Image (spheres, rainbow, N blue to C red):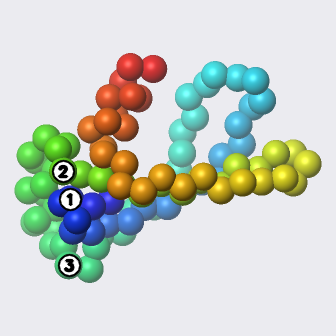
Amino acid sequence: MKYKDKVIGNYTGGPVKVDGHSSKVYDLPCTATLGKDVSLMELFALVNNKNLEGYTTDISAKIRLKGGIGKTLKFKDVPLNKLLDKVKSD
């Protein structure tokens, strides 16, 4: 995750099994690490802001079918406010 091109931290999640032909919400277990140039106090100040303008994230997801065929989807610099607006509207 970045704030105005400064790396705040990294997160990793998965794996998750998804039922075919379904429209469910799944919990994704995640692990997060703080960026090396970000202090804990700075993180609290950024989180307290509550305005997601300027926050972006890169997303990479590996999709694999039962037969073993897979594909990796990658999205770079996705604005967090747009991503969360999408989640709220679904």
Q: CA distance from mark 1 to mark 2?
A: 6 Å
Q: What's the residue at 27%, 61% (across, down)?
A: 2
Label whose residue precedes the other's in the sequence (1 or 2): 1
Amino acid type at circle 3 is Asp
Q: Amino acid at mark 2?
A: Gly
Along the viewing direction, whichever of 71 and 34 lies nearer the viewer? 71
First of labels 3, 2 by sequence position? 3
Indicate the position of residue 4 as horizontal and vertical percent values: 18, 60
Q: For numbered disc 2, what is the local secondary structure?
A: loop
Which mark is drawn over residue 37?
A: 3
Do labels 1 and 2 touch, CB within 8 Å? yes
At which x and y percent is residue 66? 87, 45
> Toward which corner of the image does residue 23 lie, by quadrant?
top right
SS for dot 3: loop
Marks 1 and 3 sit apart, C-alpha to C-alpha, by 12 Å
Please name the residue that numbered disc 1 is placed on.
Answer: 3
